[in-house]
């Protein structure tokens, strides 16, 4: 028997799904990236992925649908909240059946490193501080990523070109 999602998850899907669809559509017809010095997804080079284009789109939609879910250290479900790696693991498993590593340190080596001009929706965004992986999210297009930021926060959609994130060292990985 298939169970319906909890009411708060269903409400979030109803309110966030239209936003997710706009994000995906904007990615398809995006022009200049928000940061004039950054080029996201403009390369014609090809990098292999374990995800099909359909799965990558599903990862993106699922990640955006979880915006607003509370942050919880060690959290890995919509009902209990997420930390950054728990969010990534949940989204990849639910959307594509792929088991992502559970820690940011493990995510920093997972998949294939790709340059910023080759990043696509569904790719990982990994931030480092002092040479150590410190945070991660899921790229959703147009210079944006979804992540679970910190205690007291919620899963949110941020711009890589924002004042805070543009000062961080960032790497992109394709699962």
Image (cartoon, rainbow, N blue to C red):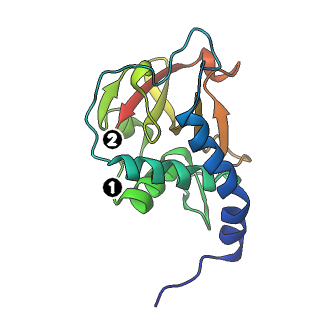
Q: Is residue 112 left or right of residue 105?
A: left
Residue 113 is marked as: none
Q: Seen from this angle, which residue lies furthest top?
A: 37
Residue at point 33%, 55% (across, down): 99
Mark earlier in primary sequence (1, 2): 1
Q: Position of residue 134 (x, y in %)?
A: 50, 31
The residue at 45%/42% (across/down) is 122
Are discs 1 and 2 less than 8 Å apart at CB? yes
Residue position for label 1: 98
Quarter of the view holding residue 143:
top right
Q: In the picture, which quadrant includes the C terminus? A: top left
Kindly indicate the quadrant of the structure image that contains residue 117: top left
Q: Quadrant of residue 10?
A: bottom right
Q: Is residue 146 above or below residue 71?
A: above
Rendered view: 49 above or below 32: below
Depth check: give the residue in front, 73 or 7.
Answer: 7
Q: In the drawing, what numbered circle is on residue 175? A: 2
Q: Is residue 61 left or right of residue 57?
A: right
């Amino acid at each position: 028997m298939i169970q319906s999602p909890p009411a708060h998850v269903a409400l979030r899907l109803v309110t966030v799904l239209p936003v997710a669809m706009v994000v995906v559509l904007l990615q398809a017809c995006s022009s200049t990236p928000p940061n004039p010095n950054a080029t996201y997804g403009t390369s014609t080079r090809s990098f292999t992925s374990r995800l099909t284009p359909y799965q990558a789109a599903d990862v993106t939609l699922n990640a955006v649908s979880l915006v607003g879910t509370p942050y919880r250290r060690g959290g890995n479900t919509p009902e209990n909240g997420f930390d950054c790696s728990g969010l990534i693991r949940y989204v990849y498993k639910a959307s594509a059946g792929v088991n992502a590593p559970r820690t940011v340190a493990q995510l920093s080596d997972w998949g294939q490193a790709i340059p910023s001009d080759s990043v696509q929706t569904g790719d990982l965004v990994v931030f480092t501080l002092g040479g150590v992986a410190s945070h991660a999210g899921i790229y959703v297009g147009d210079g944006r990523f979804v992540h679970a930021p910190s205690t007291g926060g919620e899963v949110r959609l941020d711009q890589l070109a924002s004042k805070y994130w543009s000062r961080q060292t960032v790497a992109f990985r394709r699962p």
